[in-house]
Every structure is written in structure tokens, then in C-alpha cells.
Image (cartoon, rainbow, N blue to C red):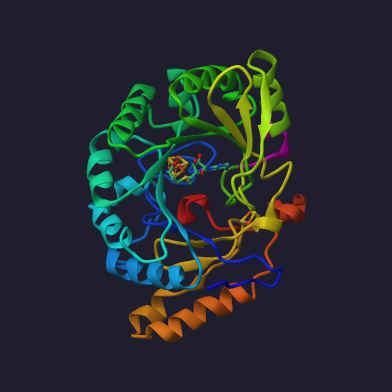
Amino acid sequence: MRLDDRLGRPLHDLRVSVTDRCNFRCVYCMPKEVFGHDFRFLERNELLTFEETARLVRLFLAAGVEKVRLTGGEPLVRRDLERLVELIAPMPGLRDLTLTTNGSLLAQKARPLADAGLRRVTVSLDSLDDDVFRRMNDVDFPVGRVLDGIAAAEAAGLAPIKINMVVRRGMNEESVLPMARFFAQRGHILRFIEYMDVGHSNGWRLDDVVPAERIVAMIDAEMPLEPVPANYPGEVADRWRYRDGDGEVGVIASVTQPFCRDCTRARLSAEGELYTCLFAVSGHDLRAPLRDGEGDEALAARIAAIWGARTDRYSEQRSAETAALPKVEMSRIGG
Ligand code: SAM
Ligand code: SF4
Ligand code: SF4
């Protein structure tokens, strides 16, 4: 089935946030001053149960979704996550099931997740320099343990592994080249992400963004690159291959080269709200009807109506005014 929104974009990907909590306080995502001890995270009964999540995922698959990504907050802090993977992995229509994680718990979790049916992982890592990394995660977490997690994912066959690096001016620009050198040799796909104005607590300024073009130029000067055609229409990363060797890198230029025209992603928050854009001001509650006993057909019609009415293209319309709007936090809907 193909479900198009008002701009002709089909519903194709679903990002499922399984928790709004995280064991990191990355400065660009959950700054400590906002997400401190008195921050009110969701209570257990506010979260969708795994069974509720799985039921919604099944309806999204029937509506045309083929790719499902589990995220958070930090998805691996949700206890027994492998149970959810087990419920989703065998569903008809599913072509890709993956997870985005900060990697901190991957050394313990990679094997059980792979056994449950997870196919791949994306690990976020902002620097190989321990000091820089600790400053960015802001909980003094050592980079070595994330590398152990990546090794465990590789050993468990969760490949190809993608590594996401958010580049923020003045914090980790110097880490771009060392990261490129390191991962080029290991066959993992490194992707650089422009720092975005998600949520309203990270104090985003355009000046802090390192444009993707500049990131590519920095790498190209030392390790010549050539462009690779997109894998499929709507791929968000621009891909580049090393001219004198295997391996590739990607850049996600959501700020300087927005790709709303091809955006086919829906996001389900941990408490069951459907967001049609990463920068949405509010979501559509699916938990209430679910818990009120609404049947599959009515729920499916609800999802179809929400997607059918979608007109979002925030990044193409970004301005000083939109950047100041009270948008949903990234830790709530998972990026
Ligand atoms: N905790 C997991 C992790 O860090 O991979 C999953 C959730 S995290 C919100 C998903 C992705 O969003 C990560 O790769 C993270 O680096 C990225 N991210 C968070 N805040 C961002 C921002 N302001 N700009 C760009 N990317 C951001
Ligand atoms: Fe946590 Fe991921 Fe946000 Fe960092 S980017 S604070 S690891 S949710
Ligand atoms: Fe999609 Fe919204 Fe991002 Fe545009 S701004 S690419 S519509 S999530």
C-alpha cells in the first residue's frame, strides 16, 4: 500500500522512540541545565508497552512503512528492549529493522539484540579524542567503551555499521579527520550530521553549524573523495567514496541543503504520539485511542488521515522565527 501526504510523499520509514531517558547529556541534545535532576521524564505507565508499540508498528507496516528504526532517548536504557525487537522482526512487510544508540551499553546488548532479529545498528560518536568526547556527552563517558560497543556489534553481525557524528563548531571540528581516517580502515560508514535547531533547549545558533560542504572539503584535501549516487530516492545522506580505497562517508546537510521534498519519515514518541516532522510543535496522540480499545481498522484510518494531511517542510522554510518556536525535543522523538 502507498499512502501519500499532501505533497505526494509516501509514508516509508518509521522511527520509534522507546524512551525519553538517556544516560548521556550531549550538549547539543539534552543539556544538563535543562535535563537536570528535577526534569520530569515520562512515568512507566505513560510509555507505550512493547505490545502496544508492536501493534502500532504492524499498522504502520500495513500502511506502507518498510524501514523501522528504534531510537530514544537512549533506546538501550529501556529494559529488555530485545523483547520488542523479537515482536517486530518477523512482521510482514518489514525490509529493515535497525537501531540508533550512543553505544554505551552495546557491549552487553549487541548479541541479545542480534539474536532477537535486529539487523543493523547506527552508533553515534562525536570524537575519538577522549577529552572532546567526554565534554560532548557531558557525563564523563570514555570513548573506549563506545569503541568496545562497536566491536561487539560487529562481532554479532549487526553490519554494515553506521557511525553518526554531529559536528558543532568550536567543539569537535578537529575530530573530523581523525574520525574519517579511523573508520575508513574499518569498513564502517561514517556520516557527518550538521548541528540542527531541534527542540528549544540547546541554544542553537547558525554560527555553530559546520556546513556539510566544508566537512567534505576538509576530508577531500587529505583523502580525495568522489560522489556516489543515492541508494534510493529520499536517502538523506549525500554519499562520497574514497578515490584510492574502499569505504565511504556521508554528510547529512539538513541545515544547508534541506531535503524535505523527499522526506518519507514518521516518528512515534515513547508515549505514543505520532509526529510528521522532526521539528513539529506537537504530535498526534495514538495512545489514548489505543487504550480506549479502538480497533485496528479505526487506528489505521487515523494514521492514514494524519499522514494524508501532512504538509511539513520545516527545513526548507527555516528562519530565525521558526528556530525560536517551541518544538518537540529530539530526545523525545529520536532524531
Ligand atoms: N541516544 C541515541 C543516540 O545518540 O544515538 C539515539 C537518539 S539521538 C536523539 C539520535 C541522533 O540524533 C544521534 O545521532 C544524535 O547525535 C543526533 N542529534 C541529537 N541532537 C542533535 C542536533 N541538535 N543536531 C543534529 N543531530 C542531533
Ligand atoms: Fe542521549 Fe542520544 Fe541525545 Fe546524546 S544524542 S543526549 S546520547 S539521546
Ligand atoms: Fe522531514 Fe521535517 Fe526534516 Fe523536512 S524538516 S526533512 S519534513 S523531518
Residue at the (43%, 22%) spot, across then down:
186
Query: In x, y percent, where is residue 104?
Result: 33, 34
Q: Is residue 98 magenta?
A: no
Query: In x, y percent, where is residue 133?
Result: 46, 25
Q: Main secondary structure of the magenta part?
A: loop
* Left or right, residue 249 beside residue 22: right
Residue at the (58%, 65%) spot, across then down:
276
* Left or right, residue 139 beside residue 176: left
Query: In x, y percent, where is residue 57?
Result: 40, 67
313 or 136, nearer to the observer = 313
Residue 150, image quadrant:
top left
Query: In x, y percent, where is residue 48?
Result: 34, 66
Q: Which residues are magenta?
A: 203-210
Q: Is residue 88 visible?
A: yes
Quarter of image, ligand 3: bottom right
* Left or right, residue 237 beside residue 190: right
192 or 3, nearer to the observer = 3
Judge whether 254 appears above or below 44 on screen.
above
Q: Is residue 209 magenta?
A: yes
273 or 140, nearer to the observer = 273
